[in-house]
Image (cartoon, rainbow, N blue to C red):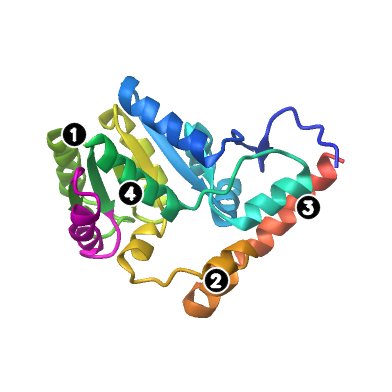
């Protein structure tokens, strides 16, 4: 299908067609040379649908310097529309790669958010697996929808004191992305990644889909079977499909 779109964009979100290797190289270069805020956002159908409904969230997602493709649905949509958006790079894989790189480069890593004590569990394991990196973990905010001024101030104090090279945040979408953007002036010289449910996968509290499930693009079905409470979230796939068909018609 010939695409008349002048940019590689999906639902009006511009996306650089980067490979996993190129994403990591860009992050490493940033750590070594940049003094600015770097925001990494994972794109999946749920996030793209939320961006169509929430103008502020859309602004935040569009402004992210790196957008990785976390979802087979996004890859399929790009093929249907006829655009190049790079390789799929799941949030859990990005997190694993960043932790390995942190050990290799002897970097400081901070984990923020997740279920109570999950971040601390991950750090306890990673201190052995990635022994050359330095780690700090905190839940940070009890209720991300109603954060207190004391909680916000406490997190920013820790960031200023610890000075992490990498900040991995798991407040859930859209809260992680919005929180990072809101505090971007206090997060300069830091690689900040919204990693979705990666904390739960890494801690082992949520089962990861077998490799063959990933290969055939049915992780969403695996999650629905193993986590039936997610069914309401899966309804966004219907909205995503409708929006993609609109894009296909638009660029025919």
Q: Nearer the viewer, mark 4 or mark 3?
A: 4
Task: Find numbered disc 4 in the image and state the secondary structure of the residue it sits on.
Answer: strand
- The reply to whether the C-beta atoms of the residues labelled 1 and 3 are less than 8 Å apart is no
* Residue where numbered disc 2 is placed: 232
Q: Is residue 168 visible?
A: yes
Q: Residue 2 at x, y = what percent? A: 85, 37
Horizontal arrangement in the rendering, residue 26 relative to residue 86 (left or right): left
In this rendering, the label closer to the viewer, 1 or 3:
1
Query: In this picture, is 118 found above or below 131?
Result: below
**Residue 245's mark?**
3
**Magenta-colored span:** 113-134
Q: Looking at the rendered structure, which numbered label has been put on residue 169? A: 4
Q: Is residue 168 above or below residue 107?
A: below
Query: What's the residue at 87%, 41% (across, down)?
Result: 252
Q: Tell me the mark number nearer the camera, choosing from 2 and 4.
A: 4
Q: Circle 1 is placed at which residue position?
A: 163
Residue 150: where, in percent of width, then height?
Answer: 15, 47
Instruction: Look at the image and say whether residue 128 sits in the magenta stretch.
Output: yes
Q: CA gap, disc 2 to disc 4? A: 24 Å
């Amino acid at each position: 299908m010939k695409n008349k779109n002048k940019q590689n964009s999906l639902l009006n979100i511009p996306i650089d067609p980067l490979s996993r290797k190129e994403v990591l190289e860009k992050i490493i270069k940033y750590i070594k040379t940049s003094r600015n805020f770097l925001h990494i956002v994972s794109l999946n159908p749920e996030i793209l649908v939320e961006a169509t409904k929430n103008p502020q969230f859309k602004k935040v997602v569009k402004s992210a310097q790196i957008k990785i493709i976390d979802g087979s649905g996004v890859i399929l949509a790009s093929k249907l529309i006829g655009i190049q958006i790079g390789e799929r790079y799941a949030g859990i894989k990005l997190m694993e790669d960043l932790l390995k790189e942190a050990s290799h480069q002897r970097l400081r890593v901070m984990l923020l958010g997740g279920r109570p004590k999950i971040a601390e569990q991950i750090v306890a394991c990673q201190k052995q697996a990635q022994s050359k990196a330095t780690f700090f973990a905190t839940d940070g905010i009890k209720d991300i929808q109603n954060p207190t001024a004391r909680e916000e101030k406490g997190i920013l104090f820790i960031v200023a004191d610890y000075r992490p090279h990498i900040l991995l945040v798991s407040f859930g979408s859209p809260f992680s992305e919005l929180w990072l953007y809101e505090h971007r002036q206090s997060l300069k010289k830091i690689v900040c990644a919204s990693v979705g449910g990666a904390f739960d996968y890494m801690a082992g509290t949520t089962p990861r889909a077998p490799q063959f499930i990933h290969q055939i693009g049915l992780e969403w079905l695996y999650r629905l079977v193993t986590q039936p409470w997610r069914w309401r979230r899966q309804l966004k796939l219907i909205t995503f499909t409708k929006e993609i068909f609109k894009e296909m018609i638009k660029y025919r």
